[in-house]
Image (cartoon, helix red, strand yellow):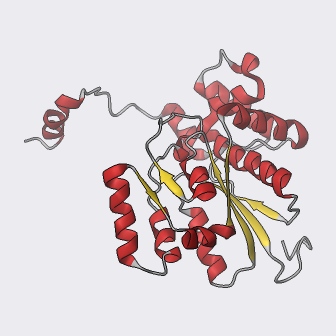
């Protein structure tokens, strides 16, 4: 951004991160602690918005419906990396951290103190539902020609919500965390569900490549002709037997 002339050296930049497990955004928090000129860390969730509620209220409550969404890497109710942030805002008090995690395991929730909550000021939390996610993919494509995956779309929509609420015009990096080729059907449905509904998986891949101008990744090209190696479909109770067959025991 500095090289492009978008910000001056040392000028803070916001980061918007789609997250379920609080990993990438925690790295951003650590970077800010180390001196990187980071402004706000925008935590973007999908319909499984436990992190949104935590940042807004200071209560982490996993006792809620779990949703399967089009951004599956964010379909998480227990954000394991959040424990590391709790340790930091608890004053590096490991015992306090352990107590809160034990509460989560036993009761499905925990609450942080007002003093700890005040230290969440670096973060903003919000979420995008499935309809908003699909709309964002379509809108960004129509305006710019850029095709984003479902996770990036969550972040893009939440970023716009943040700007609308705060008026903050700080230059912002939206962390694009996946390729649209990994979620081709969801992406193409968002752009034009009627046009692409009858297409098979590889037809959608080719359509996405034509639409985006981005070459199909080699790993996907290889799948087209790769032999099927694993054909077993196993019920849960039969898993021990199948494992023994794999191991020849």
The quarter holding residue 139 reads top right
Query: Relative to residue 119, is residue 70 depicted above or below?
Result: above
Residue ranking furthest to the front:
114
Q: Position of residue 59 (x, y in %)?
A: 52, 56
Residue 205, visible in the rendered structure: no
Q: Residue at x 65, y 15 (%)?
A: 198
**Residue 75 image position (x, y, % from top left):** 51, 43
Along the line of sight, the residue nearer the viewer: 199 or 110: 110
| Residue found at the very far right of the displayed protein | 5
Q: Nearer the viewer, residue 165 or 220?
A: 165
**Image spot of residue 105 (x, y percent):** 33, 54
Total label count? 0
Which quadrant would the C terminus be assigned to in this image? top left
Q: Residue 221: name its quadrant.
A: top right
Residue 171, horizontal then vertical, whole percent: 85, 65
Q: Residue at x 59, y 50 (%)?
A: 53
Foreground residue, 119 or 132? 119
| Whether residue 60 is situated above or below residue 99 in the rendered picture | above
Residue that protrudes farthest toward the left in the picture: 249
Q: Is residue 202 left or right of residue 212?
A: left
Q: Residue at x 68, y 50 (%)?
A: 126
Q: Is residue 233 left or right of residue 162?
A: left
Residue 178: tell me if it is visible. Answer: yes
Q: Residue at x 47, y 47 (%)?
A: 77
Q: Quadrant of the N terminus?
A: bottom right
Q: Is residue 220 above or below residue 120?
A: above
Whether 126 is drawn above or below 28: the answer is above
Task: Give the quarter of the image for residue 183.
Answer: top right
């Amino acid at each position: 951004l500095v090289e492009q002339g978008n910000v001056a050296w040392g000028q803070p930049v916001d980061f918007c991160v789609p997250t379920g497990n609080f990993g990438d955004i925690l790295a951003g928090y650590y970077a800010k602690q180390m001196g990187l000129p980071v402004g706000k860390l925008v935590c973007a969730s999908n319909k499984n918005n436990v992190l949104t509620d935590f940042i807004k209220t200071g209560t982490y409550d996993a006792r809620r419906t779990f949703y399967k969404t089009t951004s599956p890497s964010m379909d998480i109710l227990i954000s394991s990396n959040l424990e590391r942030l709790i340790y930091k805002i608890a004053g590096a008090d490991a015992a306090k951290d352990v107590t809160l995690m034990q509460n989560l395991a036993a009761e499905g929730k925990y609450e942080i103190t007002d003093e700890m909550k005040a230290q969440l000021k670096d973060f903003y939390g919000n979420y995008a539902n499935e309809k908003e996610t699909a709309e964002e993919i379509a809108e960004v494509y129509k305006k710019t020609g850029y095709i984003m995956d479902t996770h990036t779309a969550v972040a893009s929509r939440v970023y716009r919500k943040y700007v609308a609420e705060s008026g903050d015009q700080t230059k912002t990096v939206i962390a694009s965390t996946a390729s649209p080729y990994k979620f081709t059907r969801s992406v193409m449905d968002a752009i034009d569900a009627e046009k692409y509904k009858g297409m098979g998986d590889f037809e959608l891949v080719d359509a996405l490549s034509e639409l985006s101008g981005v070459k199909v990744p080699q790993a996907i090209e290889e799948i087209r002709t790769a032999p099927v190696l694993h054909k077993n479909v196993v019920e849960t109770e039969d898993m021990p037997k199948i494992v023994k067959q794999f191991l020849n025991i």
